Amino acid sequence: MTARIFLPICIALLLSGEGAISASQTSGREKSAAVRAAVDSICSRQPLARSVVSILALTEDGDTLACVNPGQKLVPASNMKLLTTGLALLELGPDFRFETTLAYSGTVRDGVLHGDLYIVGGADPSLGANIPCAEPVQSLFGRWKQLLLKAGISSIEGYVVGDDRFFPDPVPENLGWTYDDLGTYYGVGPTGLSFFENAQNFTVRPAKQQGSVPSIEPKYPLTPWMTYLNSATTSAPKSANTLFCVNTPLAAVAQFGGSFPVDRKSYTLECSNRFGAYTCAHYFCNYLNSNGVKVSKGACDIFLSRLRPSPAAATSNVQAAGAESLTKIGSTYSAPLVQLIRHTNCESDNFFAETLLKTISRKRCGKTDYTSAVKQMEACLKSLGVNPSGTCQIMDGSGLSRKNYVSASFFVDYLQKMLMSERRDDFIASLPFPGLKGTLEYKFPQKDADWRGRLRMKSGSMNGVRCYSGYILPSQEGCGPIVFSILTNNVTAPSWVVNPEIDAIISLLADALL
């Protein structure tokens, strides 16, 4: 019996007067047992029967609505963001804002800065980002220019320096991420100063003939210091788009490979930009030169503690000024953390999540390397009353690493503790629901808005992984939410086969509160 047939029968038995057990006669315990049986039935059939599954769903009263291998540790994908964002709310507070500071070395005489202007990053992940909670670039740069003018600076006889030393780690990416993720927009690590989420867009057009090289042109941001090698090919009609980008923070060179179908229209390929701090300095320098503040030497970043006039050039012999020696001009701030958290969860933004993880660690111990960051995350969980020792393995904050291993029971324990925390309402409000713009926008289109609005959950997916964890809010007062986690790994069936089965489980849980 398929889930689509079994589900209506189960609900009919529970809620109609024609079943063996009517809604008025059914106790909470009997209803829970019926839902458990329905979930078990779905998991016993394909495609989930050939997958590895961990499921747990509990009511506020402690009734178990679903329980399938709850202690099985699996790759959770972006469900990891539930841990990162919730702990960020607890550790940093909903009103926390990331700070970006303008400062300078040298002296100011007669309106001229005889020295370098430093954009001192505070790890704001929204800087220059194209998202609603970020200030538009032109507006931000305009405010930075006003800070300069207020400080009496109308020209700069030096560099505009992108200073990303807030996160001093030599390699910003997590070493547990797979090589093929590093060239993508979602596989770039957080830096102390970023721009456009350290991503870069390219316009791709197929060649007119198969076997020829497709056109791949930088779109935004433009990075004239980069050298792009293109070994991609134009492939047969209806073939797969396998384009990829390989790059490194050690050289201003990137290579494109893979294939692009000859019958495809042009599209935007989103890749990583390994020189975010330099890009920020470059764009602000251009803004100043175009708006009456001349910069004599151009943009610069910091590499191995020295000023680097271009990522394509070897580092100079000029030592970067120490942070303590700089003269501060002023600062700008990100949106409040509660808004950034909502973006992180709704859009499943890896860059934001990893920034939050490192920011928590910097606040707690002054270190931002991943070993320290994970230790601090585990310490935060213990403070919340959730012990990760022996029950999970944490490698990053976004879930991009396949070395993360978490069970459904761990997620449910954590989500329950968040319900009891002082940040309960902010955390629940940060979670996406079907119909809301983001990762769940097109989920459950057949359901009404009230039903969809009761689901507050985080999705997580990668090759072979489909996960959902979160809350199902009650439809009436006096009832508590259902806390649930559905983790599936080693899923080889296509999404259109797997998703309806997982959706059927979520529907069973949601309808149990009706």
Image: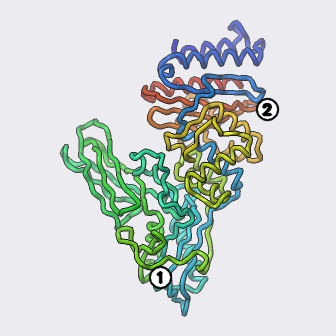
The part of the image, by quadrant, that contains residue 217 is bottom left
Q: Which residue is mark 2?
A: 477
Please give the count of numbered marks on the rendered protein. Answer: 2
Q: Quadrant of the C terminus?
A: top right
* Residue type, mark 1 in image: Gly
Of 318 and 146, which appears nearest the observer?
A: 318
Q: Residues within 10 Å of mark 2 (few under 14, many from 20)?
A: few
Question: Residue 284: image x %, image y %?
Answer: 48, 72
Mark 1–mark 2 Cα distance, whole angstroms, equals: 61 Å
Measuring 29% from the left and 48% from the top, which residue is drawn there? 257
Disc ID at residue 292: 1
| Mark 1 crowd level (few <14, some 14–19, many ≥20, 10 Å Cα) | few
Q: Is residue 52 above or below residue 280?
A: above
Image position, residue 155 (x, y; %):
49, 85
Q: Is residue 179 left or right of residue 442?
A: left
> Which element is circle 2 on?
loop
| Residue type of the residue flagged with mark 2 | Glu
Position of 481 compared to 228: left or right?
right
Q: Do we see residue 503 in this rendering?
A: yes
Measured as percent of width and height from the top left, residue 427 is found at 69, 45
